[in-house]
């Protein structure tokens, strides 16, 4: 039986300290709201935040991380490029990455996508209906055909990302917009999942259905245990070579 994935939840942890309306919803921080149901499922979960040394994402922490969750919003530019380089290298090696909500504008997601990752948005607390369009995908396990969140912030197309390898969810909003809200990618040996919901002033991450999606995504994004790939100079041929 494969070992359970080791998870690190990264969060800016700025809104919760400076905005009372966010602190009321997530008194211990968005990172703890994300970590708690994963711990309840039996996973080993660490948290890291922006203002820790090296943003809490040292070489040692990342070496012991199978899946990294990322929530950021107001301080994307404060993330050190050296840390972004480090996270990118781990993803290419095989670490899974789950990017949540406004993390679409994070340095690491834009780096891995190679695009603007731009979109349109509106915050009036409307209803979001999330349709499962790949019901056989592991991230959709145990979900209904669709589920609804209200209130939520609207994100609308066009979403400036590469076409997903697999699109698991599409959102429709009360105001009429649609959005590709569950996007799967592979970069190098690592799997990436972008999941749209999660505005900081709404209790989205307390919803069991959203927690189920994130737990499923952790299982999908975890390293598969495949062979270690060797790059570079390969001096010893597998077969005898006549020269």
Image: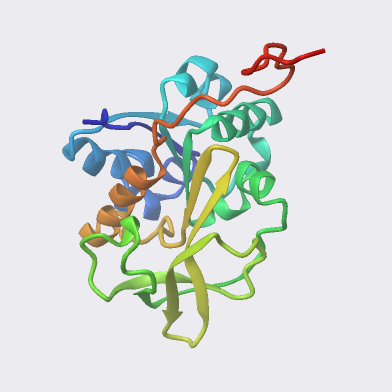
The answer to whether residue 142 is above or below residue 156 is above
State whether residue 27 appears in this view: no
- The residue at 70%/16% (across/down) is 234
- Give the quadrant of the N terminus: top left
For residue 188, above or below residue 198: above
**Location of residue 175 in the rendering, given as x and y in whole percent from the top left corner:** 47, 86
Q: Nearer the viewer, residue 230 or 26?
A: 230
Q: Which residue lies furthest to the bottom in this view?
A: 176
State whether residue 156 is above or below residue 189.
Answer: below
x%, y% of residue 13?
46, 39
Q: Residue furthest front?
A: 242
Rendered location of residue 98, percent (x, y): 45, 46
Q: In this view, does 181 lie to the left or right of 151?
A: right
**25 and 46: which is toward the camera:** 46
Q: Which residue is drawn at 26% across and 31% down?
A: 2
What residue appears at the point 47 percent right and 20 percent down from the top-left corner? Answer: 63
Side of 214 where 240 appears, left or right: right
């Amino acid at each position: 039986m494969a070992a359970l994935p080791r998870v690190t939840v990264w969060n800016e942890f700025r809104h919760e300290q400076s905005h009372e309306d966010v602190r009321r919803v997530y008194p211990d921080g968005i990172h703890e709201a994300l970590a708690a149901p994963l711990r309840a499922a039996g996973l080993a979960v660490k948290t890291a935040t922006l203002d820790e040394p090296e943003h809490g994402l040292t070489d040692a922490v990342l070496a012991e991380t199978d899946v990294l969750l990322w929530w950021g919003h107001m301080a994307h530019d404060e993330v050190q490029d050296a840390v972004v380089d480090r996270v990118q290298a781990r993803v290419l090696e095989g670490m899974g990455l789950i990017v949540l909500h406004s993390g679409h504008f994070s340095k690491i997601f834009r780096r891995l996508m190679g695009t603007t990752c731009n979109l349109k948005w509106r915050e009036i607390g409307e209803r979001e209906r999330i349709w499962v369009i790949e019901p056989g995908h592991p991230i959709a396990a145990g979900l209904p055909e669709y589920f609804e969140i209200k209130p939520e912030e609207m994100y609308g197309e066009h979403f400036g990302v590469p076409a997903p390898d697999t699109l698991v969810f599409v959102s429709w909003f009360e105001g009429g917009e649609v959005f590709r809200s569950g996007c799967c990618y592979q970069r190098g040996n690592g799997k990436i999942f972008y999941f749209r919901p999660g505005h900081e002033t709404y209790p989205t991450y307390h919803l069991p259905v959203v927690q189920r999606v994130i737990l499923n995504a952790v299982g999908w994004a975890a390293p598969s245990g495949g062979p270690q790939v060797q790059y570079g100079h390969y001096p010893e041929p597998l077969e005898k070579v006549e020269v």
